Amino acid sequence: MVSEARSITLLRLTSESPSRGEHREEETTGDGIVLGEADFLALKGIFADPASFKAVQYACEPQYGVTLRFEGPRGRLDVLLCFGCSEITMIAAGTMLASTEFDPVKPTLVTLMKRLLPQDEQIRALK
């Protein structure tokens, strides 16, 4: 679904983030940001590359702060990111497809989120 995406929308989740495997529309703040071509291509590349992820899970309960919504001909894929424990969860049609770690690309994603959400205090504080 990532490689077929025609658009990616960045959604900021509220402080009451969903638990692992859950995602509800009302928990987003605002309408989101439809990414421009450069960011769209960069994120497609990151999420299509298996080297971007580690098959390790930390013993924590993720607090998702951002959703990247990939939309394409086969539907929608929501990619939830927790920058505290570097966990990524992918959900399509209400079903959790995968959950893993994004440590290898965390610095790249943090830089991108800070640029796209410059007024967000929590995002600015990410390391």
Image (spheres, rainbow, N blue to C red):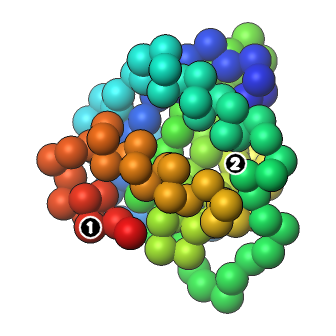
Q: Percent position (x, y) of residue 123?
A: 30, 58
Which residue corresponds to the image point at 67% horizontal and 88% vertical from the top-left? 59
In the rendered structure, find residue 125 and report the number of the disc placed on it.
1
* Visible residue check, residue 60: yes
Circle 2 SS class: strand
Circle 1 SS class: loop
* Visible residue check, residue 92: no
Residue type marked 2: Met
- In the rendered picture of this protein, how many numbered marks are placed on residues? 2
Which residue corresponds to the image point at 42% horizontal and 17% vertical from the top-left? 36
Split into 4 quadrants, where in the image is the N terminus? top right
Task: Determine whether, in the image, residue 34 is placed left or right of residue 40.
Answer: left
Task: Determine whether, in the image, residue 42 is placed left or right of residue 77.
Answer: left
Split into 4 quadrants, where in the image is the C terminus? bottom left
Q: Percent position (x, y) of residue 84?
A: 47, 74
Mark with earlier residue (1, 2): 2
Q: Percent position (x, y) of residue 100?
A: 74, 63
Q: Are marks 1 and 2 in contact (CB under 8 Å)?
A: no
In the rendered structure, find residue 29 and report the number of the disc placed on it.
none
Task: Determine whether, in the image, residue 79 is placed left or right of residue 95.
Answer: left
Sort mark 1 into few (<14), some (14-19) or many (20+) by Cα contacts within 10 Å.
few
Q: Is residue 8 above or below residue 86?
A: above
| Image quadrant in which you'd find residue 73 | top right
Mark 1 and mark 2: span between their CA atoms?
24 Å
Q: Nearer the viewer, mark 1 or mark 2?
A: 1
Sort mark 2 into few (<14), some (14-19) or many (20+) by Cα contacts within 10 Å.
many
In the rendered structure, find residue 90 and report the number of the disc placed on it.
2
Q: Is residue 49 above or below residue 53?
A: above
Q: Is residue 1 above or below residue 51?
A: above
Which residue corresponds to the image point at 15% horizontal and 47% vertical from the top-left? 119
Residue type marked 1: Ala
Q: Nearer the viewer, residue 104 or 7?
A: 104
